Image (spheres, rainbow, N blue to C red):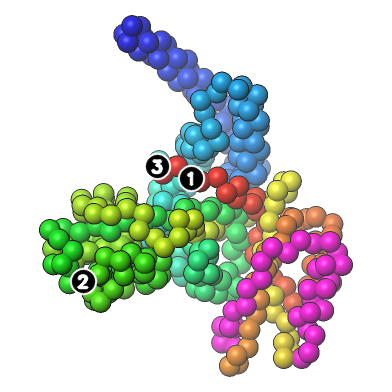
Amino acid sequence: MIQQLRQEIDKIDNQILTLLSQRMEVVKQIGEEKRSTQTAIYRPDREREILERLFNLNAMHSNSLLNKEAIEAIYMEIFAVSRNLELPERIAYLGPLGSYTHQAAESRFGAMSHYLSMNHIGAVFKSVETKCAKYGVVPIENNKNGAVGETLDALANTSLKIVAEVILPIHHSFATLAESLHSIKRIYSKDIAFGQCLTFLNEYNLAEVERIPVDSTAKAAQLAKNDPESGAICSHIAANLHALPVLFEHIEDISNNKTRFVIISDFKNQPSDADKTSLAVDLANTDKPGVLACFLEDIRKLGINMTKIESRPKTGGKDFEFHFFIDFDGHIDNPHIQSFMQLHQDKVKWLGSYVKATGIPLVL
């Protein structure tokens, strides 16, 4: 019986491979057309359109064993292979190998892409600006610790745009070569990760152990691998990459710990029906009463749904001088947003319009 079922699987696999090959033939033709018209290869809006259609089709089959997460995981890899066939591109990301940013990048660009690991966020932006990479992937905010200031500053001072966003569930592990927790004298991790795992550190009597902050949780795993008296708070993938035994998993304080990453590049997305726009706002005389309130009132009057506002010290500005970063629903080309941009063209800088992340957990 099992042999017959395996033969049936082989038959289906053959059909899938044939259909995938046919799909790639069409993709190749599209790639040739895009190159001739200098059209962007990466189209998050088109990918989201395909996924939504497949989700709806799958929902029509009540006995389907595939859920949205499974469909997205399968097709994201197909999309990545397709993009590499259309035009192989390099992707810069905040490294090192095995970092959460690396995971976010691979979730969108697949295992076949050429990745450049950069040691700080500014280097990711520079690699895209100098055409060493077509895309950059950087973290922009965590739902517990807030915005990543270095990313906001870089966006405010570059011509690059946000072309997509990725929301990645963050699960920390505790990995070590030590035979017992009592013998651990040092813990390596990124500073933000220590803050996300305070309950674990307190409950397991590790709160007083020396904490050594490093550039990334992946770097923490690498250091702990060579230090038997230490432990690392890192991702499960980083621990596996460095053959570091995982002692505890999911040690973060909150179960829904998530980080939002943005993909940056040098092109403008076409509008879709589920876009988000990001702006940097520089209001002169912010100490004048009502300046910010009047600005926000114009947003309300035009029926724009603002979803986020974040203040940030101006780079090179006076003491306690701030500018703002805002997100709102819609695309820069939407008429009501165009009206707003024209009204405040001397105050705002467009940072990109892109398809909103669905919130579906990534399968990694």
Asked if marks 1 and 2 touch (Cβ < 8 Å), the reply is no
Residue at numbered disc 2: 186
Above or below 219: residue 79: above
Query: What residue is rendered at 31% in x and 56% in y?
Result: 173
- Establish if 61 lies above or below 37: above
- In front here: 287 or 41? 287
- On the image, the x and y values in percent for residue 99 come to 37, 57
> Up-down: is 284 above or below 158?
below
Q: Decide which of 296, 93 is in the foreground and name it.
A: 296
How many marks on residues?
3
Q: Tag on residue 362?
A: 1
Q: Quadrant of the C terminus?
A: top left
Query: Residue drawn 60% across and 54% down?
Result: 163
Question: Is residue 315 covered in magenta?
Answer: yes
- Residue at 49% x, 55% y: name it: 256
In x, y percent, where is residue 21? 49, 23
Q: Which residue is mark 3?
A: 111
Q: State which mark lies toward you, 3 or 1.
A: 1
Q: Amino acid at mark 1?
A: Leu
Per the model, the C-alpha gap separating discs 3 and 1 is 15 Å
Is 132 left, or right, of 266 in this rendering?
Answer: left
Q: In the rendered structure, does residue 47 fall within the stretch colored magenta?
A: no
Q: Position of residue 80 (x, y in %)?
A: 49, 39
Can residue 93 be seen in this snapshot? no
Q: In the rendered structure, which amino acid carries the disc numbered 3? A: Ala
Circle 2: residue type? Arg
Residue 157 shown left or right of residue 144 in the figure: right
